[in-house]
Image: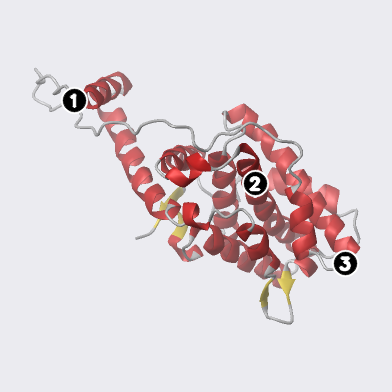
Amino acid sequence: MNKRIVTLSLFLFAFASAIASPAHAQVYNSNAGGWNTGYGTVYGSFGLAQATQNIYNTTQMQIQRLTARQAMIKQFGLAAVEKAEREARSGKPAAASSSKAAGPAVQPPPVVRNYGKFTPDASVNTAKQIADAVGETPEEKKLLMLIATSTKAAFETEAAAKGWSNNIAGALTFFIVSNATIYHGAEPSDESVETLYQALNESIDQIPEFGKISNREKQGFYNMLLGFAGIPLMTYMEGVEKKDEATIEVARQLAGGMTEMIMKTGPENIRVEDGKIVFKQ
């Protein structure tokens, strides 16, 4: 498992283990034989179904573009690729290369709109919203709130160091990476994670709905993504700590269900292969 995810998981477990309640009790509905429908209630409250339904396809295309760009940088160097991108953006044809090898053939870089960024709003209490929708007892609600708030606090320390602060793309990157890691049992490289973040930034900028939502809605959606990542992580760590394969499987099913809800695709389609995050056709 990615060492940053393991560190965060252990951080969460150290806090939540003080509460005498199994982590999976409130995240898996034994009567229905599936995960608690309260998650859909929380997700639906943001009204972002239309905005998120296109993220998978647009991110898939952006990952392909960025992967090709990285290959060109390795071949031609960053300066040459950036020069070609400036020329492509301006519509100016690239100068003929005097060498035998052709220069980089690039697409114009996407327009930067920063639709994913927002001004923080501390009054948005998504942790309580998750707890109220999913928890059935006061103990479960308390645990859910703790997981959601602890995940956010731990993530934001990492985000600040990486330049991902106050950006839906950062929370969505963490959501995808943590759930894919739990579901598939394989970890992506740091380079692949950074590529995913860049791809998500560009994807969000291409979805007009994200440009129309308020800072408060963005804060709530960001908080929700982190909470929905933290709960499978907490469940997974409980299973590992207790050597309980059933709880580990619950974490895996949770990770898969949340991936399907947010990304509108099955968890088998977002894989970790040879250290790379791969979005399948």
Please tell me which of labels 1 and 3 falls first in the chain: 1
Quadrant of the rendered image containing residue 233: bottom right
- Report how far apart the C-alphas of labels 3 and 2 lie in the structure: 28 Å
Q: Which sits in the foreground, 159 or 100?
A: 159
- Label 3: element kind: loop
Kindly check if marks 2 and 1 are in contact, taking CB atoms under 8 A apart as contact: no
The disc labelled 3 sits on which kind of residue? Answer: Thr
Residue, x 62% and y 65% (percent of image)? 252
Task: Please tell me whether mark 1 sits on a helix, a strand or a loop.
Answer: loop
Q: Which residue is mark 1?
A: 91
Instruction: Characterize the local packing of mark 1: few (<14), some (14-19) or many (20 or more) Cα atoms within 10 angstroms.
Output: few
Q: Position of residue 112 (x, y in %)?
A: 41, 30
| Mark sitting earlier along the chain (2/1) | 2
Mark 1 to mark 3 CA distance (whole Å): 61 Å
Q: Which residue is denoted by mark 3 in the rendering?
A: 137
165 over 144 or under it: above or below: above
Amino acid type indicated by mark 1: Gly
Q: How many marks?
A: 3
- Can the viewer see residue 15? yes
**For mark 2, what is the residue?**
5
Residue 270 position, x and y percent, is 46, 58
113 with respect to 146 (left or right): left
Question: Which dot marks residue 190?
Answer: none
